[in-house]
Image: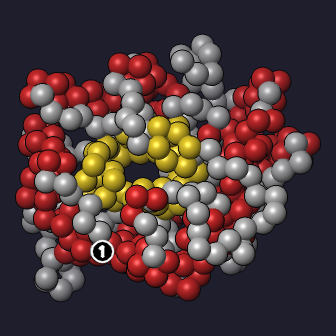
């Protein structure tokens, strides 16, 4: 993948690594860029374009959106960027997620939730068409069910995703924040009907949050039985693994400024015993990172992408230089010897009880 202008590319930029999405033939960069808390929100178009350009120049080919991010604005910015840079559609992989689409309603706030939330056939089809319009694309590569919908029959949801595949609106479908049992149920329906099941799940995964990926999905045999791939979010746990909070919360930090519900849930834990324990672990990780010639954020990202089940780790950035620092994790990953990994496990003390070996 080449950019029309590589002047922003540092001379020491690492070679990007590409992985298959689960058992599919689709390949994506092991580090990707998402617009959850940034694009279309508190980061303006000019800076967003600069970050997207830096990501493209770094070899990142996977860009993740959702209909609910910034009320659809994240998709609009991504669409404008694709047109602005003139990127070839076959050179990039774009995903979006469907569940929260109340902003699609013509009614003024509070928006109409009826048929604008969930995974009904009606909402999946209508919301996907709205997302494609915002993205200025005829299809997305991956379409996710952004959450499980326990009010809609799973067969209806599986059939609707397959309809969208058959009509060319998406090439693959996946899930986000589903339980292992729900993913298996979707696959069972797909097998029974001769349809396509979800090839990928998008869960949170980091040194501070690993039970679902390293225990639940593994014990359910989803990686082997279903060939499940992972495009994980929050590899730095909302910034907690950057080291910026070990001495308190800076006034200009996301924890101080963001009104996102997830970020606010993190803020609610500040000063708790759990918070203090996590920050003490980060202090120790900082020393490990320094010994390896890197920083704790890059070390934490490298630990995440060392997991072969992770097809890609989705990161956010508000400045281009953050992109270049993040992609260095591809090189740092090679420095994670078994000795270093054992040291990290001892520091974190959260190795899942059922995990008898690191991967399997």
- Along the line of sight, the residue nearer the viewer: 29 or 308: 29
Considering the image in quadrants, where does the N terminus appear? bottom right
Q: Give the x, y percent position of residue 189.
A: 14, 29
Can I make out residue 279 in this image?
Answer: no
233 sits left or right of 175 in the view? right
Quick one: SS at disc 1? loop
Q: Give the x, y percent position of residue 247.
A: 80, 61
89 in relation to 259, above or below? above
Badge count: 1
The image quarter in which residue 7 lies: bottom right
* Residue drawn at the location 55% of the way across and 49% of the way down: 29
Q: Which color scheme is applied? A: secondary structure
The image quarter in which residue 343 lies: top right
178 sits left or right of 341 in the view? left
* Residue drawn at the location 78% of the way across and 23% of the way down: 338
In the image as oriented, which residue stretches furthest toward the right?
Answer: 291
Considering the image in quadrants, where does the C terminus appear? top right
229 sits left or right of 353 in the view? left
* Residue drawn at the location 71% of the way across and 62% of the way down: 324
Q: Give the x, y percent position of residue 73.
A: 37, 77
103 sits left or right of 240 in the view? left
Which residue is labeled 1 in the image? 136
* Label 1 CA crowd tier, 10 Å (few <14, some 14–19, many 20+): some
């Amino acid at each position: 993948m080449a950019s029309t202008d590589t002047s922003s590319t540092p001379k020491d930029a690492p070679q990007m690594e590409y992985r298959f999405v689960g058992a599919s033939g689709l390949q994506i960069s092991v580090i990707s860029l998402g617009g959850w808390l940034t694009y279309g929100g508190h980061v303006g178009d000019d800076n967003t374009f600069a970050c997207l350009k830096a990501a493209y120049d770094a070899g990142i080919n996977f860009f993740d959106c959702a209909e609910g991010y910034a009320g659809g604005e994240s998709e609009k910015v991504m669409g404008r960027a694709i047109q602005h840079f003139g990127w070839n559609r076959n050179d990039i992989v774009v995903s979006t997620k469907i569940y929260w689409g109340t902003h699609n309603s013509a009614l003024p706030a509070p928006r109409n939730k009826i048929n604008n939330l969930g995974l009904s056939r009606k909402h999946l089809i209508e919301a996907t068409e709205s997302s494609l319009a915002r993205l200025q694309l005829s299809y997305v590569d991956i379409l996710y069910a952004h959450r499980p919908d326990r009010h809609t029959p799973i067969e209806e949801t599986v059939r609707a995703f397959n309809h969208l595949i058959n009509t060319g609106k998406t090439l693959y479908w996946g899930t986000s924040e589903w339980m292992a049992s729900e993913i298996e149920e979707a696959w069972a329906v797909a097998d029974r009907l001769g349809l396509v099941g979800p090839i990928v799940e998008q869960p949170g995964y980091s040194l501070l949050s690993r039970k679902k990926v390293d225990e639940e999905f593994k014990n359910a045999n989803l990686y082997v039985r279903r060939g499940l791939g992972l495009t994980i979010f929050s590899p730095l746990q909302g910034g907690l693994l950057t080291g910026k909070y070990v001495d308190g919360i800076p006034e200009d930090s996301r924890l101080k400024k963001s009104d996102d519900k997830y970020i606010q849930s993190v803020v609610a834990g500040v000063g708790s015993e759990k918070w203090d324990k996590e920050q003490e672990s980060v202090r120790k990780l900082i020393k490990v990172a320094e010994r390896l010639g890197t920083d704790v954020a890059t070390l934490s990202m490298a630990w995440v992408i060392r997991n072969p089940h992770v097809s890609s780790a989705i990161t956010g950035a508000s400045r281009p230089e953050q992109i270049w620092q993040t992609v260095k994790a591809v090189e740092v990953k090679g420095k994670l010897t078994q000795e270093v990994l054992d040291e990290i496990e001892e520091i974190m003390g959260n190795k899942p009880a059922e995990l008898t070996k690191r991967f399997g």
